[in-house]
Amino acid sequence: MNKIRLTQDENLSIKVSYQLLPSDQQRLDLYFSLPDEMGISPKTLAEEHYFHNSIQSHSAYYSDQLHLPLVRSRFISQQKGEQSDYRLNLNLFSYQIRIALDTDIKQTIKLKECEDFYPQAILLAEQISGLLKKLRRYAPPDRKLRAYFENADNYLSWQVEQSFLKLLSRAPKSSDFTSERNFLLALCRSENEYREENQYNSQVTLGDPNRITNKMRLLQRLIEYGVVFQKEVKNLNTSLNRIVRGTVTAVIMTFVMVLVLNARTNFTEVTIALVGMLGVIYGLREIFKEDITRIIWRRIQKGLPKWKVIYSQSVNKSRVASQTIWLEYIRNKDLPEQVDKLFQTRRQQNKQAAQLLHFRSDTKVNAKGFLPGYDEIQQRIYFNLTPFIRFLKKGKAVYTHLMVVK
């Protein structure tokens, strides 16, 4: 059984992540308990609106070992294969460096004692320096391949500098570790000078923080090519929705036409009364048409999956995994018994009437094997809680609960 991790991503967002093996499957159920006091309902916050604006899914090759991508660097150094092979191997190497560096920086920041923090920071600096040297030792002479190398090298150099500056800004203060701080600062300066020597960025770009940030975001997207899977979202019920809307419209129009014909029979001439009656009939049609369609559609759609996300390889476009998603408001009696028992264990002050929002994801890995050096893919789903927070009344404390079930 795969281990699912729920973590806080930012102040108002959470992340659910899990790993999948070739031909693996995973079901995930999340239940949001939203107190009635917040006023959240299908009318005020539609499921489709929340899904498209506040839920993001991400799938990529995964490894939890910092040195594992070095296996691929040997292929890069030999300059064999097609250009697409070189780019893919380079991106695999660069992407894993970025992920590993980000993970290690976060872990090091959590160390609050100087005796633990600075030795770990120095070790991390030595490791990343070795990885960068390994990459730069085999810079390709081919001009076309050189462009891929410079993009990756430029981004990694900038990312290393920014990561260690962030590390130093949150380091515990102590005059006993001045030499260690100077060592880390020297690493940041050397990476900055390295980029200047290679003229990776123009002075105009360097002079504008927004431009340099946007450029690095673009370079980050470039090194994700072939590693992070392309995503295609399909609406599963578009045709069914059209049929329902068409059927409801046909029934309502039939009823309206009967009323119009009866009115025309009762009024032999066109009068103000006839015109007024026809206006009332058509007005009622417009008023109730959308409400009736929405009620019928929600009943038909209940329990049906709404979206399908297809993940494919960027290089050969082959399908790697697919994800079927449900998202709907449910009633208390629709809660599974296991989930209901967990909700009953909440503190007494939090046991209040609430609206329940159910998210379900069924993920299936289609690929029977991954690229060499990678045995798993990581699925990450981000939930932005800002739309819920907007319903909070100023000065009121309302508790929102989230239940995760595998």
Image (cartoon, rainbow, N blue to C red):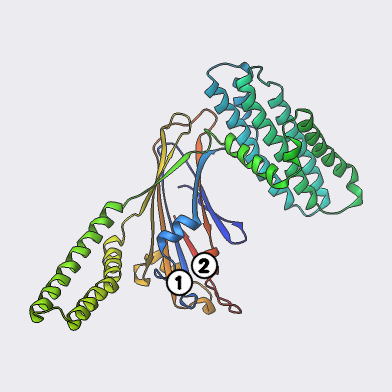
Q: Is residue 227 visible?
A: yes
Q: Earlier in the sequence, mark 2 or mark 1?
A: 1
Q: Which residue is mark 2?
A: 388
Q: Residue at x 72, y 38 (%)?
A: 158
Mark 2 lies on a secondary structure that is helix
Looking at numbered disc 1 in the image, what kind of residue is underneath it? Answer: Ile
Q: Residue at x 90, y 42 (%)?
A: 179
When the figure is inspected, residue 32 is found, relative to residue 151, above or below; the finding is below
Q: Which residue is mark 1?
A: 40
- In this rendering, would 56 be left or right of 8? left
Point out residue 330 in the picture as x, y percentages from the top left corner: 37, 67
| Residue neighbourhood size for the residue with mark 1, other residues' Cα within 10 Å, grouped as few (<14), some (14–19), many (≥20) | many
Mark 1 lies on a secondary structure that is loop
Q: Residue at x 86, y 42 (%)?
A: 180
In the displayed orientation, state which residue is furthest to the right.
Answer: 175
When the figure is inspected, residue 228 is found, relative to residue 134, above or below; the finding is below
Point out residue 77 in the picture as x, y percentages from the top left corner: 64, 19
| Residue neighbourhood size for the residue with mark 2, other residues' Cα within 10 Å, grouped as few (<14), some (14–19), many (≥20) | some
Point out residue 338 in the picture as x, y percentages from the top left corner: 40, 64
**Residues at badges 2 and 1 in contact (C-beta under 8 Å)?**
yes
Point out residue 257 in the picture as x, y percentages from the top left corner: 14, 70
When the figure is inspected, residue 223 is found, relative to residue 165, above or below; the finding is above
When the figure is inspected, residue 376 is found, relative to residue 32, above or below; the finding is above
Quarter residue 270 falls in: bottom left
Looking at numbered disc 2 in the image, what kind of residue is underneath it? Answer: Phe
